[in-house]
Image (cartoon, grey):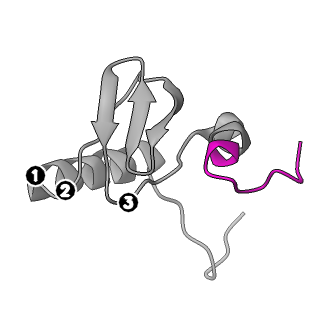
Amino acid sequence: LYSHYTAIVDNKSVLQALEEELQTSGRVKLLFNTRFLGLKNEFTARTSRGDIKFKQFINAAGAYADKVAHHFGVGKEYY
């Protein structure tokens, strides 16, 4: 099946390139296999790897994103 309005990409390669670009920028820190345990205060997250201070928090928790969001007072009407 061919459609000139769509494209096929190698998702794994795209994400690996994005990860590399973000890591080398020095502006972000990506932590894998790290469990979010809650908030210590407004700008500190408690995790399985210790406390992490942040200015901006990006919730990329996938299926658990709602549970993480609840700690920030967001989406509590969705359970």
**Which mark is on residue 24?**
1
Which one is nearer the viewer's eye here, 69 or 60? Answer: 69
Q: Of the residues under marks 3 and 1, which one precedes in the sequence?
A: 1
Q: CA distance from mark 3 to mark 1?
A: 19 Å
Spot occupied by residue 65 in the image (x, y as percentages of width and height): 66, 43
Q: Which residue is mark 3?
A: 56
Q: From the image, state whether disc 3 or disc 1 is nearer to you.
A: 3
The structure residue drawn at horizontal position 82% and vertical position 50%, both measured from the top left corner, is 76
Q: Of the residues under marks 2 and 3, which one precedes in the sequence?
A: 2
Spot occupied by residue 7 in the image (x, y as percentages of width and height): 55, 69
Q: Which residues are magenta?
A: 69-79
Determine if the magenta segment contains residue 65: no
Give the crowd class for mark 2: few <14, some 14-19, many >=20 residues within 10 Å.
few
- Looking at the rendered structure, the kind of residue marked 1 is Thr
Q: Which residue is mark 2?
A: 21
Q: CA distance from mark 2 to mark 1?
A: 5 Å
Q: Is residue 65 left or right of residue 27?
A: right
Type of secondary structure dominating the magenta stretch: loop
